[in-house]
Image (cartoon, grey):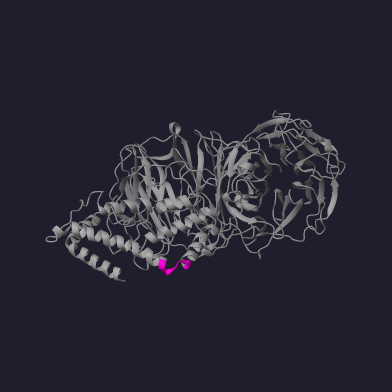
Amino acid sequence: MGMLVCGIFVFALFFQCHSHSIQNSMHRFKRFQENAWSDPNDCSRTRQPFVLSNPYNFSLDIRIPGVIPTESDSYYCMAVPVPTSREAYIVDFIPHASMDTAHHMILYGCKTPYATQGYWDCGKELGTCRDQAKIMYAWARNAPPTKLPKDVGFKVGGDTRINYFVLQIHYGDVNSFRDHHRDCSGLSLRMTSKPQPFIAGMYLMMSLDTVIPPGKKVTNADIACTYKSFPMYPFAFRTHTHSLGKVVSGYRVRNGQWTQIGRQSPLLPQAFYPATNTIDVKNGDILAARCMFTGEGRTTKTQIGGTSNDEMCNFYIMYYMDNIHSVPYMNCRDDGSSELFQNIPSEANTPIPVSPDHMMSMKHESAPQKDAVETLELQQPKREEDVLDQGAHLVEVSDWPEAELQLGQVSGLALNSNGDLIIFHRGDHIWGRVSFNMNGIYQQKDLGPIQQPTIIAVDPVKGRVLRASGRNMFYLPHGITTDKDDNYWVTDVALHQVFKLSSSGTDQQLLVLGEAFEPGSDKNHFCQPTDVAVDPVTGNVYVSDGYCNSRILKFSPEGKYISHWGAGSSDRKRRVPFWIPHSLAFLPDKRELCVADRDNGRIQCFMADTGEFVKEIKKDMFGGEVFAIAYSPVQGGLIYAVNGEPPYGQPAPLQGFVISYSTKEILDSFSPDTQEFKIPHDIVVTADGSVFVGDAASDSVMKFVQSAKAEHRSVKKGGIEVQEIEETETFVQANLKPLPKIPAQSPVAVVQKIQEPSQKQHQQPLAAPEEKEKPQTVANQSAQGISPAVITTLLLIPLVVVIAIGVFIRWKKGRMYNDCQVKLEPSGSTGGILGKIRGKAAGSLNLGNFFASHKGYTRHGFDRLSTEGSDLEKDDEDGTDSENEEYSAPPPPVSSS
């Protein structure tokens, strides 16, 4: 106690002697702070520029200057000049907005805005630009921000006729401003003067003559043009209608094949979304789009126009082209022919379910007006067979089958035209470590073929056996499928062959591909082929080959070799080969073939006719392994998948997944309740939505059905990414606290220099919840067990040190007591106290980088990112997202399955 009193006495003497000097230094600090940018959301002050470390890169910050909307559905615009008269390139957009304040914002580029000073109401008399306004960016609540692929930029300035940026912000509910705080939402543009290899552009498809009759349930607006330019590569899309639009879809049509570019409900936030497929558009291709409207609720006809009582049909394609041949803006306004659109996929007329909290009011972007209440109340027409129950979740049928099935390792499942379940199993044979040598040659031929029937047809309702075949034919069965005539197509990894068999029960071999027990990599040999898929229209046969080879082979119905291909890639600069293409699914409505690339943990889809790469689906939840896939055409296309345990790394829970083909989002995940998945090896889905999974380790088949009453465990928004957006938006909201009442000032666009990152930021994996909580619990337990003597000692040690320092300073400065002055560094020096404090704050507590390292944040490609990634210190290097990364390590020894 005495030591504590002594310490207080010494501190009193110390602060008494320095009172005047501290007061003087605080005055300097205050004067410094008044000139600094203290709040990144305070748009009423001028932000100090950074020192340029790279002469080519800079950042343009565009903010609405502290407005307070007075009525709901207000639109405010402001213009900012392009900061250079020469050509420059926008390479990144960083939004600064809270979903609780701004409804959406759009950035336009033009030559002559309506005003060049201040901001204006652009929702009534005035618009955005006096000349043609070119949309460049859109952000909306509940929607992902636009990200440009690497080496792609929007060209502005120079002779591009984009001399000004016009920011338009729509404020939805004025109740968000009941506290009278000012808003300064906006965005930062990361720009460079370095020419980019690829130039981004916009292709606008719009209908001009559509008339929607009152009360008519469905009216289609079709647009189509033949593309006549150099190749372009779509990477994002946007839809726009007013209140009557239900779904808008865009396609590339090549040689009669329709490939989706994007499909979205205009009731959802009308931002730019990633393109559905990775494709190119070449000279001679047709670009086609359809807007589906309903006239229900209207008493008069509705035409295309600029008011909210009119309608619009716009489909935007954001693309990039080679710099040399780039065309920045193109459009299509031609009505599509009925002959062309009779072949459009049925999904173009299937509405997308939208929850009320995700709806947005449908207004014209340049001259919006108040919409009727029916905007949000108008119900969408739905086709029950095309829309899944949003509350449904797949659960195990514990009493299926009613009688136990006598099975060996279950390797393959299929369905015939009657809906019967076909099981392919290995009987008493087991794939073990000694089954093959290093060259893929089967080592257990002396066991002879499997004597039990290996192909079992089962009633899907009760699980009773209907018929059995496949005796004394196979050594190690693997994949199975059926064709339109119900013939069986199977693979045997020991024989290295593919068989077409009659399903009549006679075991008649109709076709055999490959040579028995002879592995190879030419067009007449396979090496442990894994699966088969058959085109129901052409009869062409696709074989995944396999454990030793990394390819897909295509044959005619008669077994004649046509072509083969390897893995695709959405990255122009690298392509990771297949690592055991393990399962195939044919998508008849899309004319595509999807591959479960097992040890790469991804699903890749290709055009079935050409082998052209379309898209890739890769998720953290797969855990690095995707064993099997199946497809259902409902709801625009659903992919069903099962994962497996990887031979290396940390395994993920074994489970099944339901994935949206269009958005790549995981809609549901499921696993059995009465047992566990061990090696879920194949999966099929029936017409009624029932799912069967064959497990190669438990020698069983499990059935799952939809149950809305069960606990819903679906991942409706893709898991971590959406959590990342929500958490970051919370951070933005915290920055948008009410500001002091300041007179509105003219908008200020500040050019900031971008500091090059000193080193690449590495992603850190998230710890499991148990791991995060455990240290805290241990710490609490430890704190409870510490004795008072130890606590007292720990408190006294720093106190003694402080007293010693105080006595030393007292002795050192004793000669200065008469005037009490202290020497300080100049306030403008970065070595000053404030400079050090600011340096620490900026360098060590970067929330953008914090979320980046803990939430799978990536800057690579067009990924869904947080809506507030505003820190300029963010990593500009390539990153690999767990959703899209591709492994390049050499494959380890193949595990058996």
Residue furthest toward the bottom?
1
Q: Is residue 262 left or right of residue 183?
A: right
Task: Find residue 592 and report its horizontal and vertical position in percent.
Answer: 65, 41
The image shows a total of numbered marks equal to 0
Relative to 255, say whether 126 is above or below: below
Task: Find residue 331 and report its horizontal and vertical position in percent.
Answer: 47, 42
Task: Find residue 440 and report its horizontal and vertical position in percent.
Answer: 72, 33
As for residue 787 lying within the magenta part, the answer is yes
User: Where does the N terminus fall, quadrant-wise?
Assistant: bottom left
Residue furthest toward the right?
506
Residue 892 figure quarter: top right
Q: Is residue 852 left or right of residue 830?
A: right
Q: What's the magenta region?
A: 784-789
As for residue 639 lying within the magenta part, the answer is no
Relative to 142, say whether 508 is above or below: above
User: Where does the C terminus fall, quadrant-wise?
Assistant: top right
